Image (cartoon, grey):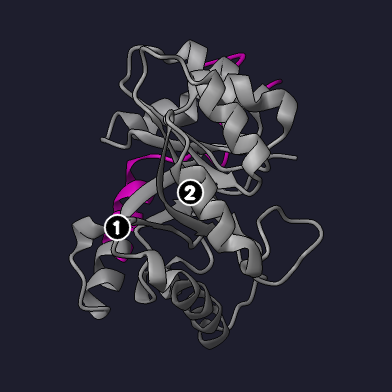
């Protein structure tokens, strides 16, 4: 079954109120440990590979922001859920042939890493919509399999994106090399935070942290955590 074909099919790993409630509690506890207000951290539910039924189950309990990695998977979901006031975030790797769909259908894009693609997004953003919120993705470890700009090119890209009329640069996104060691996790997020510190008086968003490391990310200043598995369970292959 393709994602989006059914709104009601149950799966063994389907998320629901309990998983959402537990995640909200864990985020609040991590914020308190870091001396931060819980409402300073937004939960982005990563719905890649999930059915419409799974999405609706947590929407019913107040989750309205969803992140998608693949445009071709996201568009049927967006079309099928038009009346739920959902906020859609594109968090996958940008491709030139997908920018129009992103500009027209999403409220946020977290993975801007080239000025040429940012220019396309700005030019293609419909005039009747608010400016497209965006984050610049930084490739912390120069991993070939990941998107993101090299840290040394950050300043130039920031200047270029800020000048685009239909984009609103909100901050930065990173996906560090995975580690199960909280000390290593925090060190990676700290490097990222320190890298963007010169811009924090201008921008308000640090998109970092996933199901396995969001607590370390919150300790280092995350304002959006991108949670999939801990909400929905493992995706069916």
- Magenta-tinted stretch: 1-26
Relative horizontal placement of residue 87, taking residue 210 as reference (left or right): left
Residue at 77%, 65% in the rendered image: 143
Percent from the top left, x then y, of residue 175?
60, 62
Q: Quadrant of the N terminus?
A: top right
- The residue at which mark 2 appears reads as 135
Relative horizontal placement of residue 68, taking residue 133 as reference (left or right): right
Q: Quadrant of residue 174?
A: bottom right
Residue at 45%, 78% in the rendered image: 194
Q: Secondary structure at mark 1?
A: loop
Percent from the top left, x then y, of residue 201?
28, 64
Q: Nearer the viewer, residue 203 or 37?
A: 203
Q: Nearer the viewer, residue 65 or 137?
A: 137
Whether residue 51 is visible to the viewer of this picture, yes or no, is: no
- The residue at which mark 1 appears reads as 41
Above or below, 76 relative to 12: above
Q: CA distance from mark 1 to mark 2?
A: 16 Å
Q: Quadrant of residue 199?
A: bottom left
Residue at 40%, 12% in the rendered image: 82
């Amino acid at each position: 079954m393709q994602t989006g074909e059914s709104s009601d099919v149950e799966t063994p790993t389907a998320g629901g109120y309990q998983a959402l409630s537990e995640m909200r509690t864990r985020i609040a506890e991590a914020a308190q440990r870091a001396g931060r207000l819980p409402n300073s951290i937004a939960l982005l539910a990563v719905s890649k590979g999930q059915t419409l039924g799974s999405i609706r189950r947590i929407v019913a309990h107040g989750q309205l922001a969803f992140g998608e990695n693949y445009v071709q998977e996201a568009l049927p979901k967006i079309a099928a859920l038009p009346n739920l006031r959902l906020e859609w975030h594109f968090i996958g790797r940008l491709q030139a042939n997908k920018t129009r769909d992103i500009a027209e259908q999403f409220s946020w894009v977290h993975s801007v890493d080239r000025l040429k693609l940012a220019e396309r997004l700005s030019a293609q953003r419909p005039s009747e919509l608010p400016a497209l919120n965006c984050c610049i993705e930084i490739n912390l470890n120069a991993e070939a399999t990941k998107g993101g700009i090299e840290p040394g090119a950050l300043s130039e890209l920031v200047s270029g994106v800020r000048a685009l009329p239909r984009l609103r640069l909100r901050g930065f996104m990173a996906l560090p090399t995975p580690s199960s060691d909280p000390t290593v996790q925090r060190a990676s997020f700290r490097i990222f935070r320190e890298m963007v510190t010169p811009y924090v008086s201008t921008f308000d968003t640090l998109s970092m942290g996933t199901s396995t490391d969001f607590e370390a990310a919150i300790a280092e200043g995350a304002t959006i955590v991108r949670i999939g598995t801990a909400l929905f369970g493992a995706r069916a292959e």
